Image (tube, rainbow, N blue to C red):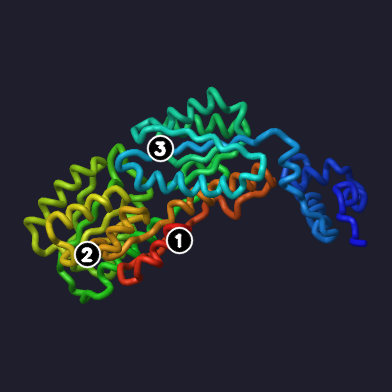
Amino acid sequence: MSKQRPTLKDIAQSLGVSATTVHRALQGKEGVSALMSEEIRRRAMEMGYRTNYMASSLKRKAQKLAIAFPEPTLDNRYYYMSLWRGVRKFFREVSEFHVEPMEFYYPLAPGSNGAILREIYEHYAGEIAGLITIATDHPQSSYFLEKLAAKGIPITLVGADLYSEQRLCCVKAYDEMAGSLAAELLTAFQPKDLSARVLVTGNPVGSFAMLDQYYNMTGFESYLRAHAPGVTLQTTYHSDVHVSEQQLRTLLTQDPEVLAIYSTSARHTVMMSLLVEELGLQGKVRLIGSDLFPESLEALESGTLTAIVDKKVPLQSYRAAQYLFDHVIKGAYPPSGTIFIPPSVLLHSNGSADASQAFLR
């Protein structure tokens, strides 16, 4: 006959403490000293104790976890659909647990993230056990994240590492590395005294600025200064992708010295790919795009894009959901306050099979 699995009571008796103390220590709850918690976890491991998280979760009411991301419409869909894809994938995988995801959409406009956080705070703060959202540098966002955190609601952020006092953790791309990789790709086979013009497009500045794109651009510029100082770098930054398109169109039709274009954003990647195809410049101008999604994969397969720097957007939101779930259901903490997802490079020469596999992860 197999040995009976140890219980919380068995662990408590072996240490001379209450079962409640053991439960609190194993769940990471307050009220037990760090020294005692460590001793309890060590003894539980020695005795072969394993928490049945599924059974325990079914005994309590459904844990509601809120997800607040921009709605994936129009050209917002390239990036934000990837965010939704990752978080939905995770919740499908844990559907057997007593967890209920609550999705909140909002338009991509100044203050809209703060407005949805206000709605969540005023109408759902008493229901939810956790929150996943993007990090937006806006006073109203900061205010309501602080209010939600004060109610003991753990928060995981995606994208930019802000509000360290309010959030459980932030999952983000290694943005400067992504920019450096893009610059290295553009200059790898060129002489160091290269004097061509390189264009950068995206939205790292202004009222709609994306902090991830700012650090991405910083990595790109730093690499070029160090390894290709003869390159002339010209930017076509704007929150309105159509304004950036007109700037690019003018430069491409008037300047034959343009060697390459790098886009720090998904929507600008689509725009520059379509523009280069329209102007018949495929193969004449190198294009490095950001993020992997159906439209960028198609441009890579056709040869319009030379490469994609994939920041693994679905994996970012997947991990953010995973760390929040583990904290709420298992009492576990993330390995760090900031979790970096390293980018990868997809080349046209890799073949579409490799790119497709990366897209499905």
Residue 47 found in image quarter: bottom right
> Which amino acid, by three-letter code, is at mark 2?
Arg
Q: Earlier in the sequence, mark 2 or mark 1?
A: 2
Q: Residue at x 60, y 51 (%)?
A: 334
Q: CA distance from mark 3 to mark 1?
A: 24 Å
Screen quadrant of the N terminus: bottom right
Q: CA distance from mark 2 to mark 3?
A: 31 Å
Q: Are marks 2 and 1 in contact (CB under 8 Å)?
A: no
Q: Would you call the spot at circle 1 few (<14 residues within 10 Å), some (14-19), or many (20 or more)?
A: some
Location of mark 2 (residue): 286
Left or right relative to 360: residue 37: right
Q: Residue at x 73, y 35 (%)?
A: 60
Location of mark 1 (residue): 342
> Which amino acid, by three-letter code, is at mark 3?
Pro
Q: Secondary structure at mark 1?
A: loop
Picture coordinates of residue 241, whole percent (x, y): 23, 44
Residue 42 found in image quarter: bottom right
Picture coordinates of residue 226, whole percent (x, y): 29, 68
Q: Earlier in the sequence, mark 3 or mark 1?
A: 3
Q: Residue at x 57, y 34 (%)?
A: 149
Q: Would you call the spot at circle 2 few (<14 residues within 10 Å), some (14-19), or many (20 or more)?
A: many
Q: CA distance from mark 2 to mark 1?
A: 23 Å
